[in-house]
Amino acid sequence: MSDDAAVPAVRASDAERDALVVRLQAAVGEGRLDLDEFAQRAESAYAAVTTAELERLVDDLPVPTEIVGSRAPQTLRDVFGDVRLAGPGLPPRQISSVFGDLRLRSLAPGESASRWRAVLDRLDRGRGGPAR
């Protein structure tokens, strides 16, 4: 009896198949897979019944790493959508939206809304941008 037979097979979910295809797409973007190999592996991923079958499709690829913590970008631009910022972090230094609205919701617990009113007042008066 092999070790594989001792472990019961776990059926793969649609979300797991989709996540694996996203991982394969990243591998194409990194130059690890060519388009033909991606197509073959993606087809196999959607046909996979068990998680073991999915794992075999990425055995030769590095395990993705999760970046812990992040910082706001220096510039945030959007053309046709609204810019919404949320969370206790600092906003980007420069924000622009051509056909959208800017919405800030980033008060940390205990933080005063007056800080954001002052920032928005400066922007309204045209003095909010960095000096050049």
Image: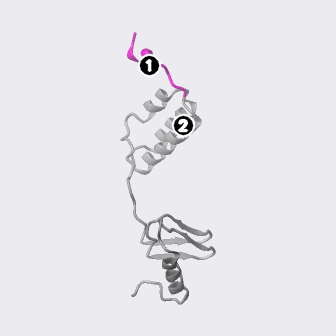
* The magenta stretch spans residue 10: yes
Residue type at mark 1: give it.
Val
State the residue position of label 2. 17
SS assignment for the magenta stretch, majority: loop
Q: CA distance from mark 2 to mark 1?
A: 21 Å
Report the front residue among 56 and 132.
132
Amino acid at pointer 2: Arg
Closer to the N terminus: mark 2 or mark 1?
A: 1
* Residue 129, disc: none
Q: Nearer the viewer, mark 2 or mark 1?
A: 1
Give neighbour class at mark 2: few <14, some 14-19, many 20+ (Cα, 10 Å). Answer: many
Q: Position of residue 132 (x, y in %)?
A: 39, 87
| Range of magenta residues | 1-11
Residue nearest the observer in this picture, 35 or 2: 2
Judged from the image, the secondary structure of the residue bearing numbered disc 2 is helix
Q: Residue at x 52, y 40 (%)?
A: 39
Reading the image, the residue beneath label 1 is: 7
Residue at 43% x, 46% y: name it.
27
